[in-house]
Image (cartoon, coloured by chain):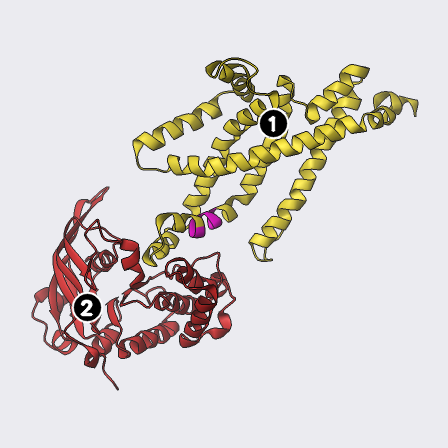
Chain colours: A red, B yellow
C-alpha cells in the first residue's frame, strides 16, 4: 500500500505557535483548554490528535479555521495569519475543509444543493460548474444516487459522505476532521475511515481528531497526544504506540488498547 | 320566515354588497402591507434583540415590552393624534397611513419574538458549518439560518397574522374605511346590528378560512410534500 507519508514535503501548511485559550465555565470556573500549544503540520502530512474528552483536542482543531478564537499565540495556515484580525477569515476558511462529528448538513437543502451552495456563494463558480463538480464528488464518495435526497432521508454514514464531498468541493488545502466517525454506527465507521484513508493516500494534508487508534496507527504520519490543554507527547505512530515516553500517554494507551 | 327576516335581512345586506366588498378589499390590503412590513422589520428587530451589545438589545427589549404592555387602541391613537404633533400638526398623515404605521409598530415585536425563537431553534451546527465553509455573516443568516427559522415557525406566524387581520377592525375608530367600518355603516344607516355585524363576522371567518388554505399550500411546499395538514 502506498503510504501517506511519501507525500510529505518540507512546506509548512499549518503552524501553531504558543496558542492559549481559556473558557469560563459556570461551575468549574476558568478552564485552560489550550495551554501554550505549539505544533506544525507540513504539506501532505496526516496529523492525528488523540486524548481524553476535555483534553483540548477539538478546541485546537477549531482554532485552525478560527471557529474558536485564541487568547494568545499565533496560527498561520498556508501563509495566511489566522490570528491576525486583518486577515480575510472567510477567504481562509474556504481553503480549510472541516468535517464535523454531527455532519451539520444544511437541513433545508438536498445533498446536491449542500455541495453546490458554498461553491456558488463563496467561490463564485457558475451554477453549471458547481453542479457538475458536486455530482462528480458525490460519485467520488460513493453515493451518486442520493443527489436529490434531503439530509433527513440519509443515514449517518451517507450524511458524513455528503459533508466530506461538500468540504472537498472547495478544493481545500487542509482538511480538519473533528471526531468524524464518533456519531456513526459501528458498521458505518469503516466506510468513512476508508474514505479518509483514500484522501490521505492522495496527498491531502489532514488534521484528524479521533478515537480510532487503528486509523491513527495506520494512516497517521504523526500522532499528537493531548492532556489538560497541553501536548504531552508527539511522534511517529510506531514510536508513539510501541514506546511512549510520557507516563500520562502510557496510562491512556493502557486504558484504550 | 318573517321572524328570520327580522333577525337577519339578506336583502338589505345584498343592497350593501359594494360597501362590504370595499371593506373586505381594504382589510385585505392593509393587512398585507402591515404583514410584509412587520415581518421585514421584525427580522431586523429580532437581530437587535439578539445582539450581545447592550446599546442594541436593551432598547429593542424595552420597545417589545412597551408594545406588549399597552393596549393597541392606545397605540393607534398615539400614532394618529400624537405622532403628527412631532411633525407639524394633525392631518399630515391620512387615517389609513396612520393606521398602517400603528398596526405595523404593534405587530412587529410579536413577529420579532416569533422569528427570534425560530432562529434559536436552528441547530448551532448549521451556523458552524456555514462559517467553516467561508460564508460571510449575512450570507449565513440569509441563506442558511433564516430559511430554516421561518420554516420552523410558520404555524405561529400564521396565528399572529390572523390576529393582525382582526386587529385592523380597530382602525375603524380612526375612520379608516375597512370591513368593520363597512359593517358599522350598514348598522347605523338602517339601525340593523345583525345585518352589519354578523355579516362582518362571517366575512372575517371567510378571510381566515382562505388564509388556512393558503398556509397549507405554503407549508406543503416548504416541507417537500411531507407536510400533513392539521
Residue A126: quarter of image:
bottom left
Q: CA distance from mark 2 to mark 1?
A: 67 Å
Tag of residue B167: 1
Up/down of A173 relative to A32, above or below: below
Q: What is the chain identity of the residue bearing mark 1?
A: B
Q: Secondary structure at mark 1?
A: helix
Residue A93 falls left or right of residue B64: left
Tag of residue A97: none
Asked whether residue B160 is in view, the answer is no
Residue A190 picture location, percent across and down: 35, 75
Most foreground residue, B56 or B156: B56
Residue B191 picture location, percent across and down: 80, 14
Residue A65 is a magenta residue: no
Q: Secondary structure at mark 2?
A: helix
Residue A187: quarter of image:
bottom left
Q: Which residues are magenta?
A: B143-149
Disc 2 with disc 1 on a shared chain: no
Which residue is label 2 attached to? A255
Q: Residue at x 23, y 79 (%)?
A: A4
Residue A97 picture location, percent across and down: 31, 64
Amino acid at each position: 500500500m502506498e503510504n501517506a507519508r511519501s507525500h510529505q514535503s518540507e512546506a509548512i501548511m499549518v503552524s501553531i505557535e504558543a496558542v492559549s485559550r481559556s473558557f469560563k465555565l459556570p461551575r468549574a470556573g476558568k478552564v485552560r483548554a489550550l495551554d501554550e500549544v505549539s505544533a506544525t503540520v507540513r504539506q501532505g502530512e496526516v496529523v492525528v490528535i488523540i486524548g481524553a474528552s476535555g483534553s483540548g483536542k477539538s478546541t485546537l482543531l477549531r482554532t485552525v479555521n478560527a471557529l474558536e478564537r485564541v487568547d494568545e499565540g499565533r496560527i498561520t495556515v498556508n501563509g495566511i495569519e489566522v490570528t491576525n484580525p486583518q486577515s480575510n477569515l472567510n477567504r481562509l476558511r474556504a481553503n480549510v475543509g472541516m468535517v464535523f462529528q454531527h455532519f451539520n448538513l444544511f437541513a433545508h437543502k438536498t445533498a446536491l444543493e449542500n455541495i453546490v451552495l458554498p461553491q456558488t456563494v463563496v467561490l463564485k463558480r457558475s451554477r453549471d460548474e458547481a453542479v457538475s463538480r458536486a455530482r462528480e464528488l458525490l460519485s467520488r464518495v460513493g453515493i451518486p444516487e442520493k443527489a436529490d435526497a434531503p439530509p433527513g432521508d440519509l443515514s449517518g454514514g451517507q450524511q458524513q459522505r455528503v459533508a466530506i464531498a461538500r468540504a472537498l468541493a472547495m478544493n481545500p488545502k487542509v482538511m480538519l476532521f473533528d471526531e468524524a466517525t464518533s456519531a456513526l454506527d459501528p458498521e458505518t465507521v469503516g466506510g468513512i475511515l476508508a474514505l479518509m484513508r483514500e484522501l490521505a493516500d492522495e496527498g491531502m494534508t489532514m488534521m484528524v481528531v479521533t478515537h480510532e487508534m487503528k486509523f491513527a496507527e495506520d494512516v497517521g504520519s504523526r500522532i499528537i497526544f493531548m492532556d489538560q490543554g497541553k501536548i504531552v507527547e508527539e511522534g511517529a505512530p510506531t514510536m508513539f504506540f510501541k514506546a511512549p515516553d510520557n507516563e500520562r500517554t502510557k496510562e491512556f494507551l493502557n486504558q484504550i488498547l | 320566515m318573517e321572524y328570520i327576516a327580522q333577525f337577519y335581512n339578506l336583502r338589505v345586506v345584498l343592497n350593501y354588497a359594494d360597501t362590504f366588498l370595499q371593506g373586505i378589499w381594504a382589510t385585505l390590503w392593509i393587512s398585507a402591507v402591515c404583514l410584509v412590513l412587520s415581518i421585514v422589520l421584525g427580522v431586523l428587530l429580532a437581530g437587535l434583540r439578539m445582539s450581545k451589545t447592550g446599546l442594541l438589545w436593551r432598547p429593542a427589549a424595552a420597545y417589545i415590552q412597551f408594545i406588549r404592555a399597552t393596549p393597541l387602541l392606545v397605540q393607534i391613537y398615539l400614532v394618529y393624534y400624537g405622532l403628527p404633533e412631532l411633525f407639524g400638526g394633525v392631518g399630515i398623515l391620512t387615517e389609513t397611513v396612520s393606521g398602517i404605521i400603528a398596526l405595523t409598530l404593534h405587530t412587529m415585536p410579536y413577529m420579532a419574538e416569533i422569528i427570534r425563537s425560530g432562529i434559536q431553534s436552528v441547530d448551532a451546527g448549521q451556523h458552524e458549518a456555514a462559517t467553516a465553509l467561508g460564508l460571510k455573516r449575512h450570507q449565513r443568516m440569509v441563506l442558511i439560518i433564516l430559511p430554516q427559522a421561518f420554516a420552523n415557525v410558520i404555524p405561529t406566524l400564521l396565528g399572529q397574522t390572523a390576529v393582525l387581520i382582526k386587529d385592523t377592525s380597530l382602525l375603524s375608530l380612526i375612520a379608516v374605511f375597512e370591513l368593520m367600518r363597512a359593517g358599522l355603516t350598514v348598522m347605523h344607516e338602517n339601525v340593523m346590528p345583525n345585518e352589519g355585524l354578523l355579516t362582518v363576522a362571517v366575512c372575517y371567518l371567510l378571510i381566515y378560512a382562505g388564509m388556512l388554505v393558503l398556509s397549507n399550500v405554503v407549508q406543503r411546499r416548504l416541507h417537500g410534500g411531507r407536510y400533513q395538514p392539521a
